Amino acid sequence: MPFLKCNNCQAEFSIPYTSDSCSKCGKPVYWLHVRYEAGKIEASRLPDSNARSLWRYASRLPLSKEENVVSLGEGWTPLIKCRGLASTLGLNDLYVKNEGVNPTFSFKDREVSVSISMAKELGLVPVAMASSGNAGSALSAYSARGGVKSVILTPEYTPDEKTVQMTIYGSTVLKIKGTIEHCRRLVGEGSRRFHWTPFNTSILRSFAIEGTKTIAFEIFEQLDQIVPDTIVVPTGSGRGCMSIWKGFAELQAFGLISRVPKFVSVQPSSLHPIADAINGKVGAATGARSIATALLVQNPPDLDLVVNAVKSTGGHALTVSDNEILGAEMLLAQEEGIFAEPSAASSIAALVKLKESGELRQDERIVCVVTGCGLKDTASARKATKQAPVLEPNLDSIAPYIGH
Ligand SMILES: Cc1ncc(COP(=O)(O)O)c(C=O)c1O
Ligand SMILES: [Zn+2]
């Protein structure tokens, strides 16, 4: 049976557990992680079923009753071998884990599917969330599907596509004049006043990690039980990065792999507290803007845990500029036919940078996690593309464009 364990005082709690802190040492909920009975398993027993969603790993997820599962077929996304991009960059073995094909077009579907299922199971409703757009879109969709009420606070600068998407599924969506930090504070205060369950600061966040960790399980299965050498992860709060790390750490605990891949965490060059902490620097920029809007997190609550996770793999962090991200967005689209939003394309921007600086070996097996779809932010993509010309309806006007 899954249970919760405090990373600080090692206290263990059985599920259901609904407090937002460790009842032994008082550390906030960030410290409580879901654990599973120790013991080795056979690789063939890793998926519990052939379900083409993350629920194929049901016995490694915290839910107890199948009837509470709120699913739209999230997870089991393609791991795409990128031969064109690899040869352009001088690499041999490169893959993209394309999370943009999830039901609401980002990797956030994984965490929200598991957490909303748990919110139903434990009666932790209505749910409120501060979101830069993707987690909010997922929350709104899964709330609709699960018959749960939800409220989403999002910064004013959130792209229109994400705002429309959050709204269409029926959640209450409110834009706040400020950053994601302002939204977070208001969700905290609102939870006390309006009796919401705050997604990111309640026990739901511990369950969210379980959803995203399945990216690691899938990569392991999709690579025929081989561990990649390096995995590159776009990083905002760092929860995604830490969750994928947890997935690999569990595979190691099950005896299925002997090492965890080296993690490379990527942040925007305008705001990068996690990269700074990993690289032993202080003094991140504040209030910065970037086209990677989903990565703009000033005070990541899990900072220490993320930093420890990345460092424990011998990994590191780097930052990428808006121009580098846009270039990578184009490169990925035109070499591989994968359209990523800027935050998601940051993993490709990092890859380009690492290769140029000689930090990657040609024969490394690398997985870049591409966390969301490019249609989430077309205004950014438009900056990198030419406008399609509008022509008279005859072949003479077309000829100059096709070299005739
Ligand atoms: C597309 C995309 N990539 C990466 C991230 C960063 O994830 P995390 O905050 O878990 O680090 C987000 C967060 O919203 C996102 O939407
Ligand atoms: Zn504790």
Image: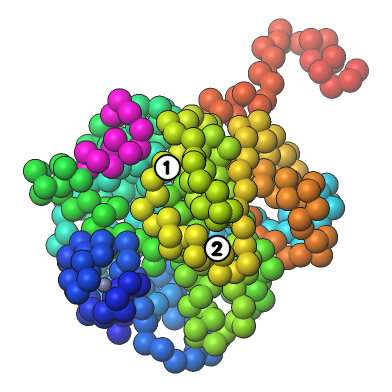
Question: Bounds of the magenta span?
Answer: 175-187
**180 w.r.t. 255: above or below:** above
Q: Could you tell me how far apart the alpha carbons at marks 2 and 1 are, in whole angstroms?
A: 18 Å
Q: Position of residue 141 (x, y in %)?
A: 32, 47
Q: Which residue is mark 1?
A: 297
Q: How many numbered marks, from 0 up?
A: 2
Question: Picture coordinates of residue 267 (x, y %)?
Answer: 55, 45
Q: Amino acid at mark 2?
A: Val
| Name of the residue lying farthest toward the top | 392
Magenta portion: prevailing SS class: helix
Amino acid tagged 1 = Val
Dot 1, how many residues are within 10 Å of its Cα: few (below 14), some (14-19), or many (20+)?
Answer: many
Task: Decide if residue 286 is in sight here.
Answer: yes
Examine the rendered structure and indicate whether residue 240 appears above or below residue 268: below
Residue 74 location in percent, x, y? 43, 59
Name the residue at 66% across, 47% down: 350
Spot occupied by residue 83 in the image (x, y as percentages of width and height): 79, 55
Ligand 1 neighbours mark 1 (CB distance < 8 Å)? yes
Residue 140, relative to residue 240: is it above or below? above
Q: Determine whether the residue tagged by mark 2 lies in a helix, strand or loop.
A: helix
Q: Is residue 27 magenta?
A: no
Are the residues at dot 2 and dot 1 in contact (C-beta closer than 8 Å)?
Answer: no
Q: Residue at x 49, y 35 (%)?
A: 285
- Marker disc for residue 310: 2
